[in-house]
Amino acid sequence: MLRRTSLATAVLMAGALALTACSAEQTPAPSTSAVADPNASVTLRMVAEPGNLDIRETAGAALDQLLIDNVYQGLVSRTPEQDIVPALASDYEVSDDGLTYTFTLREGVVFHDGQPLTPQDVVWSLTQVRDNPAFRDSERLAGMSAVTADGQTITITLSQPDSSFLWNLTGRAGLVLKEGDATDRKTAANGTGPFTLASWRQGDSVTLQRFDGYWGDPAGVGEVVFAYIPETQAALNAALAGEVDVVTGFDANLSEQIEANGDFAVEVGASTDKGTLAMNPAEGPLADVRVRQAIRQAIDNEAIVEALGAGQTQYGPIPELDPGHEDLSDVAPYDPDAARELLAEAGAEDIDLTLTIPSFYGTTVSQILVSNLHDVGVTLEVDAVEFSAWLTDVYMNRDYELSFVLHTEARDFENWADPEYYFGYDNPEVQELFAQSLAATDEAEAAELLAEAARIVSEDHAADWLYNGASVVAVGDSIAGMPTVNVNERLNLAEITKSEG
Amino acid sequence: MIRYALTRLVLLLLGLVVASVLIFVTLRVLPGDIAQMIAGVGSGPGQVEAIRERLGLDRPLAVQYVEWMSGVVRGDLGTSLLTGTPVATELLQKAEVTVPLGLLAMVIALLFSVPLGVASALRRGRADGTLITVGAQALAAVPVVWAGMMLVVVFAVWLGWLPAQGFPRAGWADPAAAWRALLLPAITIGIVEGAMLLRFVRSATLQAVGQDYVRAAAAKGLTRTQAMLRHGLPNVGLSVITVLGLQVAGIIVGAVVIEQLFSLPGIGRMLVLDVGQRDLPKVQGELLVLTGFVLVVGFAVDLFHRVIDPRQREAQ
């Protein structure tokens, strides 16, 4: 089987337009006289600032948004719609047995410090990630038995087929850095992307500047500023006062306010954000599948989506943007009477449960949960904690009953096949299906197996997926080319432009 | 006098040592740790352990404390575990925002609290005097955050005179822009702190008005206002300086809240971010400096009193 992909910008643009058509129709089309200023500076409001800039070690989507595609690149990348596209490789082939990946490395690529990209840099980077367990996503390259370079041809050999391998290369694991680079990754960056990391003012902003030595089409603006403004109200004020051009992570309920004077339009795009209510099956009432099902049926997911002002319901572990998605709304529909019956059957009437939730998520979701569960006789205590406390208590020590976090990662079904993950979900059948999906060399087959596994996870009521979040972005009227799909995960700004005046 | 100063200095140092232990211990009681924060969601225990070891967090707490203190004595406050930057460098950089903000807030607080406080005391019992007092009571009860939000809506969003948030990226290279960025936050802190100060000035003035020396001056032919200005105010000033010294701590707390609200890259916002990230060596260095600053201000106020107030000198 031969697979060849080229960047079909037109197709992607059409997809993006279709997704945002509703909001686009309401806003006046930008006047044709508006000319993009190639040296413009665009300021984007971001919610969370990364702790440091170490793309190899430090977790967090904030770092992916800032650095991947914009500053660092891999052989391949992904579009907001989750399609895999070439980046530092001009094209690639996968052998029929799914064991050999052959990439043609672009020529004339230089790093921001002026050094040329060599095939050896690719070999070194991938080997480093695989062999250093402290590096993030190291285990994603564990199946890579060899990576070699011959001229501009890079050949990767796997020990067994892995249908997620190419996808993994579009993420952190696949990023290519300069061999032996002495740049302090914690505070600086040396990549091959369309922007250089110009400065980081901690507690304030990161500034990217267009890299004039970039191998591809030059970035559409001279400078991009990621301004970290955690407070929603402060972000709204900054937008209304004309201090930011784009507001990401916006609250859809404030759309009218930000659109009031016509300077901003709110764009709602799909995302892989999964509002996940984990239910610890290790002990207590939640060990009983009937109690877990009752909780799911007691929760009015549609009311949650409505309260958030954007997004859609999701009744299984796989969101619509990911392969293996299917509509699982029939598994646990909202039905408080059924929930009460299930609880009675399980002898779990009038139980008390504690929800551990990082405090930055606010109270919208937890208030609905408290009220919904109260209706069926479950008293829910909400324990709002700092994220670091959530990481230690819930994620690491699995010391929780119910937990809520927004999982933004795309294609993360693997967590349901890993009994060591904080979900504590252990079903050999699901693990087997997931393994088969990885081993499948046909994309459609891999997706089908995932869908099958996802249905089982949902039928086991391993968690409740309260909603599939939306990317809500308020875009200033002088801005074009701002991605609107899945921006909480990745944010490629190469094509953003700003018109004069 | 020198003996007094030395005694106070020893107390100050003792205070710092006690503070350092309290800071160190309370931070370690916080749930969560930085290795877990770095590794984040999607990490296994192996990765977290590797990071803990690399950062030296696996060593006994007593060793870590002694190491910190021996650094502090040599003038090294420690380094950030996240970025490797020295704490002193970070503090100096953020002080460029927080120190002018605090000074400006203090000036604003003084500018309206002293004249209004004196006026409301001298005009006690009249309508305008009562109005000032009631107004100050109301202002002092206003939460800082709410006051700030109202000011932003009026002056930044409606009128567009001042920035709604942030600090110029060029910093003090453009002083006008920098001061403009600090004005709304400083007013926010200033009015809340000033309202408290106003009540204090008023009661100090009232007290002075009733003193024999003011009545004696009035008996010699000065008007009551003249007598107050010549003889009463120096005494009021003394009390104001004492209260102001105490309010330094209040202004620092105000800065923590206000820098969040206005997204100002100052010491307060840095502290909140660092606590959230559990960058404990950095947080403890920052807290020690802030505590030291408050203690030193208290020390200076005490000495100043000693120097300026003849009654205290003679009492020795």
Image: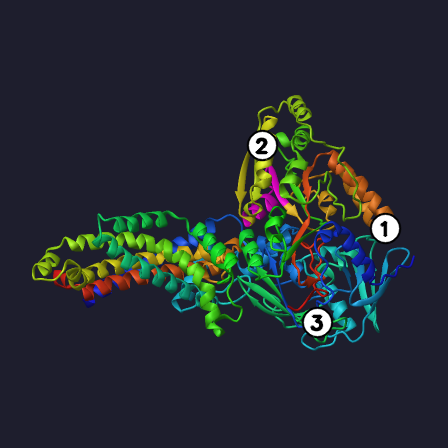
Write the start and end of the magenta stretch as one range. Answer: A388-405
Q: State yes or no: discs 1 and 3 in contact (Cβ < 8 Å).
A: no
Q: Position of residue A497 (x, y in %)?
A: 70, 66
- Mark toward the viewer: 2 or 1: 2
Q: Amino acid at mark 2?
A: Ser
Question: What SS does tag 2 mark?
Answer: helix
Q: Position of residue B164 (x, y in %)?
A: 51, 59
- Going from N to C along the chain, the mark reached first, 1 or 3, is 3
Colour treatment of the image: rainbow
- Going from N to C along the chain, the mark reached first, 3 or 2, is 3
Q: Position of residue B290 (x, y in %)?
A: 39, 60
- Going from N to C along the chain, the mark reached first, 2 or 1, is 2
State which chain disc 3 sits on: A
Q: What residue is shown with label 2?
A: A371
Q: Amino acid at mark 1?
A: Glu
What residue is drawn where x is 66% and y is 54%? A265
Is A396 colored magenta in this rendering? Answer: yes
* Circle 3 Cα neighbour tier, 10 Å, few/some/many (<14 / 14–19 / ≥20): many
Q: What residue is shown with label 1?
A: A443
State which chain disc 2 sits on: A
- Mark toward the viewer: 1 or 3: 1
In the rendered image, the quadrant that contains the C terminus of chain A is bottom right
Q: Left or right: A233 with respect to A315?
A: left
In the rendered image, the quadrant that contains the N terminus of chain A is bottom right
Question: Do marks 1 and 3 share a chain?
Answer: yes
Q: Is residue B122 visible?
A: yes
